[in-house]
Amino acid sequence: MHPAMFHTAAPGMIEAENLVMRYPTGRLALSGATLTIAPGDLVAVLGHNGSGKSTMLRCIAGLLRPTAGAVRVAGEELTRLTGRKLADARMALGMIFQHGHLVRRRSVIANVLCGTLGRHRGVATSLGALPWSEADFAEQCLDAVGLASLARQRADTLSGGQAQRVAIARALAQRPQAMLADEPVASLDPEAAEEIMRLLRGLASNEGLPVVCVLHQPELARRYADRILGLRQGRTVFLDDAETVTPQQIASLYEGNAP
Amino acid sequence: MNQIDGIALPAEARQALLPRHASRALPFFGVLLFLVVLGQAAIVVQARPQDLISGAHGMADILRRSFPPDFSKIGDTFEPALETLDIAIFGTTAAVLMALPLAVLAARNTTPARPFYVLARGIIALCRSVPDLVWALLFVTAVGLGPFPGALAVSVHSIGMLGRLFSEVVEDMDMGPVEALTMAGASRLQVFSHAVVPSVLPSLLGIALYRLDENIRASLVLGFVGAGGLGFQLLTAMNLFQYRTVSLLLLVTFGIVMVAERLSAALRARIA
């Protein structure tokens, strides 16, 4: 992977400040979480189910609008944008979900090309045509996740790990300034999980992207992340360098009866 | 089951009673109720099995007079047969084109706003609840005899049937790719054409083909109310007591329905 291959603009800092999220049901999922991630930094977010870690990531991604607080990506305030401007801002954020979320009946390369749609808003692409002018670039993205040989295969023939790597290639095709991952290895076997974590680590170290990764496995977090954010009931319990986080600190996240 | 023997019971008592009593009593009362319903149905339809026996002579007479089918008229059946097929093809295609946008509005996960949802659901329900035969009667009155009112009737009724099934497909769709493409900065229209359409298209095609097959059968009957095609020929031949022509027309009908069914099933199997 060549340095700085996948983004035109410089990787941007992600700043999440005092995020508060109260769902319409009245549940307070997040009460004042703050996180700043510099380019090249990989932060793992740990916490019990319902600790607010996915909510936090979705607020940063602009998929949820926080009740209070601000999210800035490369200095731009995301929480105030709507419509076209929000879509433009989202392009700067590559997002990976628990499942690949690929369009199953289309080819791998077609799925990767979908990542470039934001740069090609026209009549043809609105009617279902793919921006094939980006085919070479899409193949580079596939190459970066080691799956160039599967470009013509249909997405529903892939294994879980392969699908997740294609999803990363699709996110790279956006030319992102930052990467967000929501439990990217939760439904993968250990080997595939290591592969995905290595790729995310590489994106931070080699491409200089800031990476936020919600995880369920403390052990993976300690090995791959630079820093670990521990959340419990919507509050920050700790935010420390991965090496200095103690097993006791991690255990404290999962103790007791969190909702 | 909030009540047993018309008496409201507290929740605990209900739970204690239901498993033991209900398991034996419910099937018994169920069967009894069904027999009562069936009995009144037999009285209302004036079912008289003896009429079938006394009418056997008349049936045999009609069968004798319809045999052999008058194959010399096979050439004359070509045009009405084509008309029947075309009513179905035109009606189904028009219905698919109308049902697609309606279904998107009538699916909870894709509708842009609540009023659109309610309106689309209303149109679909209206089209579906009025049988195609009734639509045909209405359109014959409006645009006159011939195949066109038939095509309109088929199309309007199909909009209702397809609209409902299409919107169910859209509602059951995997929203993952939609979320992923939204995150990738794609516009609403792009998300629709690149994430929604590829996921639902095979199911929609399958449903449309099945509808075409149903509409071919429907358009045969529509001829009876003056909407052209084989049905109209059948009615005319019946009224003129030309039973050998009737049997020929029935054979042609049988052939068309069989071929359409097989073809539609084969195509659907290929898409899936």
Image: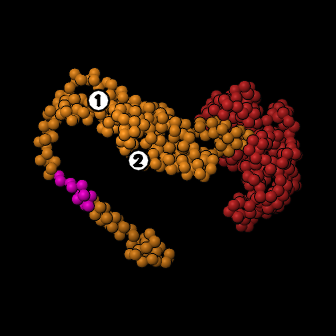
Chain colours: A red, B orange
Q: Quadrant of residue B55?
A: top left
Q: Which mark is residue B48?
A: none
Residue B218: percent from the left, percent from the top?
Answer: 36, 38
Q: Return the x and y of residue B56 as percentages of the image width and height.
A: 13, 43
Q: Which of the labelled discs sits on residue B130, or is there none?
A: 2
Q: Position of residue B2 (x, y in %)?
A: 46, 71
Segment colored magenta? B39-49
- Classify residue B61 as left or right of residue B5: left
Task: Tell me the SS state at disc 2.
Answer: loop
Q: The residue marked by circle 1 belongs to what chain?
A: B
State if disc 1 and disc 2 touch (CB < 8 Å).
Answer: no
Mark 1 lies on residue: B252
**Does the stretch in magenta take in B46?**
yes
Residue at 14% x, 38% y: name it: B60
Quadrant of the frame with the C terminus of chain A? bottom right
| Residue depicted at 47% across the width and 41% down the height | B159
User: Which SS type dominates the magenta stretch?
Assistant: helix
Three-letter amino acid code at the position of disc 2: Val
**Residue A251 among those drawn in magenta:** no
**Mark toward the viewer: 2 or 1:** 2
Q: Estimate the spatial distance between the alpha carbons at disc 2 and disc 1, rounded to whole Å.
A: 29 Å
